Amino acid sequence: MKEYQFNAIIQQNGDMDASYIIFPYDLRAEFGKGRVKVHATFDGAPYDGSIVNMGLKDADGNICYIIGVTKAIRKQIGKTFGDEIEVSITER
């Protein structure tokens, strides 16, 4: 099973205390679908979630696929909005 490793910046979701990172690959090209259940680690902290399109676009107008970074994980790794983290993703 393919593992994706990359660094990402923790993004804040609006004015909420919620965050996400952008999956920097074309999800449909990589997995053949627009929503993927994954095993992830954020700076080594494990998380099971989904990579989805929440209607966000990058500066060039391209669709962004994201995965949430929970408040508990941010606390565990000692990082917050704007911080860079190491990410590992595999499909589950």
Image (cartoon, grey):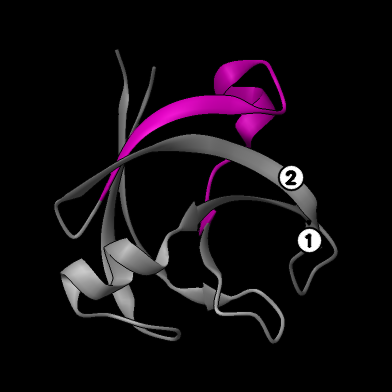
- In this view, 71 is above or below 34: below
Using a 10 Å C-alpha cutoff, classify the residue at mark 1 as few (fewer than 14 neighbours), some (14 to 19) or many (20 or more): few
- Magenta-drawn segment: 22-41
Residue at 65% x, 74% y is 13
Residue 12 covered by magenta stretch = no
- In this view, 32 is above or below 15: above
Nearer-the-camera pick, 78 or 84: 78
- Give residue 39's quadrant in the image: top left
Q: Secondary structure at mark 2?
A: strand
**Residue 50 in view (yes/no):** yes
- Give residue 80's quadrant in the image: bottom left
Which residue, given by chain and number where applicable, does mark 2 sit on?
53
Q: Which mark is residue 56?
A: 1
Q: Which amino acid type is shown beneath numbered disc 1?
A: Leu
Residue 62 is situated, as x and y percent measured from the top left of the image, at: 80, 56
Quadrant location of the C terminus? Answer: top left
Residue 28 is situated, as x and y percent measured from the top left of the image, at: 68, 26
Residue 46 is situated, as x and y percent measured from the top left of the image, at: 22, 43
Residue at 29% x, 12% y is 1
Q: Which amino acid type is shown beneath numbered disc 2?
A: Asn
Residue 85 is situated, as x and y percent measured from the top left of the image, at: 28, 68
Using a 10 Å C-alpha cutoff, classify the residue at mark 2 as few (fewer than 14 neighbours), some (14 to 19) or many (20 or more): some
CB atoms of marks 2 and 1 within 8 Å? yes
Residue at 62% x, 33% y is 27
Q: CA distance from mark 2 to mark 1?
A: 7 Å
